[in-house]
Amino acid sequence: MKKRFMMFTLLAAAFSGVAHADDAAIRQSLAKLGVQSTEIQSSPVAGMKTVLTHSGVLYVTDDGKHIIQGPMYDVSGAHPVNVTNKLLMSQLNALEKEMIVYKAPDEKHVITVFTDITCGYCHKLHEEMKDYNALGITVRYLAFPRQGLESQAEQDMKSIWCAKDKNKAFDDAMAGKGVKPASCDVNIADHYALGVQLGVSGTPAIVLE
């Protein structure tokens, strides 16, 4: 029994060493590019790893010599599935309590929108909210200040997200009314960082279920 346990331990260590070596090659290649990985996972494609970074998801060959940036799609089913977005969906849903939600009475679909109150197209989308809800589409908002963190837009959106009635504060802002200052522990930087990981570069950016 003791010998079997020792053999299992040695095998586990061997496989762990191989995995560590592969990750080391990937980390070394990313370091040359100034990219810091937050997590390295297995990939749907043999010979590649999925790498989560602060600036998005990368797919890197095991030897670290080739890198692919952008969404990966699984087309094996009836409809293409964005594997990259699906990977980050758990992080998206983790922010659900901080979202400003416009729920459809007869909900059929849920979309998450990264928005900016200074964005004209965001205003246009919000004006059509009743139409979306009537179609059974629930809309969930997260903040994505295009001018970056510490901008006036970021400060105003934090006030909206901290308001007692967030929906009314958001409606007022989208109608061009002033934003009343408010503070709380909502961190707009978390919204922004997730948007960057999802590849958001402009608003409104819509993430499907």
Image (tube, grey):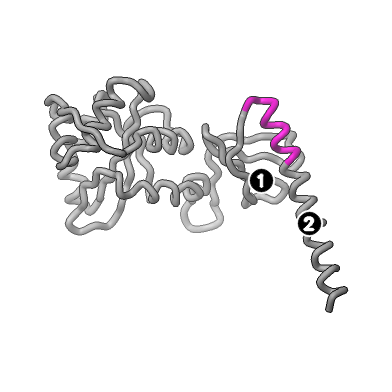
Quadrant of the drawing holding the N terminus: bottom right
* Magenta residues, start to end: 24-34
For mark 2, what is the residue? 15
Residue 49's label in the rendered image is 1
Q: CA distance from mark 2 to mark 1?
A: 16 Å
Mark 2 or mark 1: name the one nearer the start of the chain. Answer: 2
Most extreme residue toward the bottom is 1
Helix, strand, or loop for circle 1? strand
Residue name at image x 21 percent, y 47 percent: 102
Q: Report the amino acid beneath label 1.
A: Lys
Residue displayed at 31% across by 38% down: 186
Image position of 72 (left or right of 122): right
Q: Secondary structure at mark 2?
A: helix
**Residue 112: image location, x then y, percent:** 33, 44
Front-most of residues 69 and 160: 160
Tell whether 122 sits left or right of 76: left
x and y percentages locating residue 16 in the rendered image: 76, 54
Q: Quick check: is 198 in the magenta stretch?
A: no
Question: Residue 20: x and y, percent?
Answer: 75, 47
x and y, in percent, of residue 202 in the image: 38, 27
- Residue at the image point whose x is 27% and y is 57% from the top: 108
Count of residue discs: 2
Q: Is residue 20 above or below residue 149?
A: below
CB atoms of marks 2 and 1 within 8 Å: no
Question: Quick check: 24 left or right of 189?
Answer: right
Q: Quadrant of residue 154?
A: top left
Q: Amino acid at mark 2?
A: Phe
Magenta-drawn stretch, dominant element (helix, strand or loop)? helix
Q: Nearer the viewer, mark 2 or mark 1?
A: 2
Is 67 left, or right, of 83 in this rendering? right
Magenta-colored stretch includes residue 31: yes
